[in-house]
Amino acid sequence: MTTIRLDHPAAGIVTLRPDGAPTALDAAAALDTLVLEVTGGHLTWSLLAGQQLPAATLDDTEAAQDWLWAVYGENIALAIADDEGHHRELTATPARPELVTALRRLAYAHWASRWWPASTIDSIPALDRAVLAKEIAELSAVCESVVAGADDPDSAALAIGRTTDVEAGDLALALDELRQTERARDNALSEGSPPSLSDDQTTDSAPTTEPSDSRLGRDHTPADGQSTVPRRGRAEDYALAAGGEAGGTGLALARGDGDWDWRCCPPGLVDAGARSVSWQVRRGGGVTTVEVTALAAPDCPRDVSAHLRPLARLRAGDTLAEVPLVRRGDAWFGELRTAEVVENVASVAVLVPGVGPEGPLPDESATRTSIRDFVRHRLDAPQADDMLAAELAAAEDDSDF
């Protein structure tokens, strides 16, 4: 049994909220918030808090009556049906606890499709997206009585308070399509058939022109034409790359590495590790060069369309600039050149334009660290009855990192 509070935060809106639980009305959903669009509203859970019974935000209480009794108990369903606008505390006793478990599992699967922190540098393997999509479909069928009336349950975990003009879900879908194209191409090559490319895809990931205010690194391709992007790699090798290995010409003035905001890129593009973004400042010939490196995600496609490529927004001295990043091997690279003498870089943000909430972003580095720790614990001590099939597969492959 769980005590929940019934509230009316706005006209036509009813919330059912266990103590401390997030709701769909929160101004900015935390990174660990599980969200599921359901008939008549949304369900939300706090992942890191281990919350099992969801909070509900209802905009159609009549439609929600089809499942309220199963998730919260008949007393809650009756209280909402007879509601007179009073705020009160009630005791929830789910009539179908197995459905509550399945709903949370479905919400977690959607969350993992967006926020799973795949990182070579932090030894967190990527999830197999085909396996994950299959399990989402299976769980959706199990939870059909609750999610059947939702407009688009697949997008709920992506949309609330997290994107602006360009939906991260749309970009993630585009990346998935690129992965599928590459998989088909690899299969064709292995069978001896030549690959075919669509009109908007090329095997060169670098842009054809360079911005006038920056000099971008060249795209290196091995002589045999094979990609240098490894399917698996050793974490310590990537740690060296992220730590700012010496390169280029001129006197090295400063270097550093750090985190980036996961809200600002679609999944599967940039490594989600704590030290996946690095920079260094060099001075020579009267020119200061600021070099930025962002490791690519373990499952990042080799050929990324131009509108999906990230850029680095950096502040160095008095210079605030956006530097396009190009794929070079298993990382994204970019350079900024300026006559100004720069001794340090104040900030580096990696983003895809249009992704992420508007305005200043809160510091969520502690939450990202907690999510990485949570995921590592699951992979290190897998429990078959608690984990998604994609997680179990990743745990088996984890030794390759």
Image: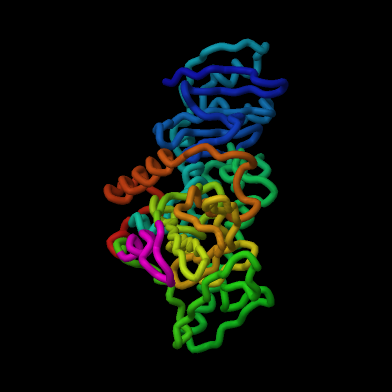
Q: Residue at x 70, y 48 (%)?
A: 165
Q: Residue at x 49, y 56 (%)?
A: 342
Q: Tell me the quarter of the picture where residue 369 sits.
A: top left
Q: In this orientation, which residue lies closer to the viewer: 335 or 84?
A: 335
Q: How many marks?
A: 0
Q: Residue furthest right?
A: 11
What colouring style does the render use?
A: rainbow
Q: In this orientation, which residue lies closer to the viewer: 170 or 89?
A: 170
In the rendered image, is residue 245 in sight? Answer: yes
Q: In this orientation, which residue lies closer to the viewer: 355 or 387?
A: 355
Q: Residue at x 48, y 85 (%)?
A: 225
On whether residue 386 falls in the magenta region, the answer is: no
Residue 392 higher or lower than 250, as above or below: above
Can you give x and y, in whole percent of width and height, for residue 394 in the image? 36, 58
On whether residue 250 falls in the magenta region, the answer is: yes
Residue 206 higher or lower than 387, as above or below: below
Q: Residue at x 58, y 73 (%)?
A: 206
In the rendered image, is residue 389 in sight? Answer: no
Residue range of the region highlighted in magenta in the rendering:
237-254
Q: Quadrant of the N terminus?
A: top left
Q: In this orientation, which residue lies closer to the viewer: 217 or 295?
A: 217
Q: Residue furthest front?
A: 286
Can you give x and y, in whole percent of width and height, for residue 234 in the image? 31, 65
Can you give x and y, in whole percent of width and height, for residue 245 in the image? 36, 65
Residue 1 higher or lower than 100, as above or below: above
Q: Quadrant of the C terminus?
A: bottom left
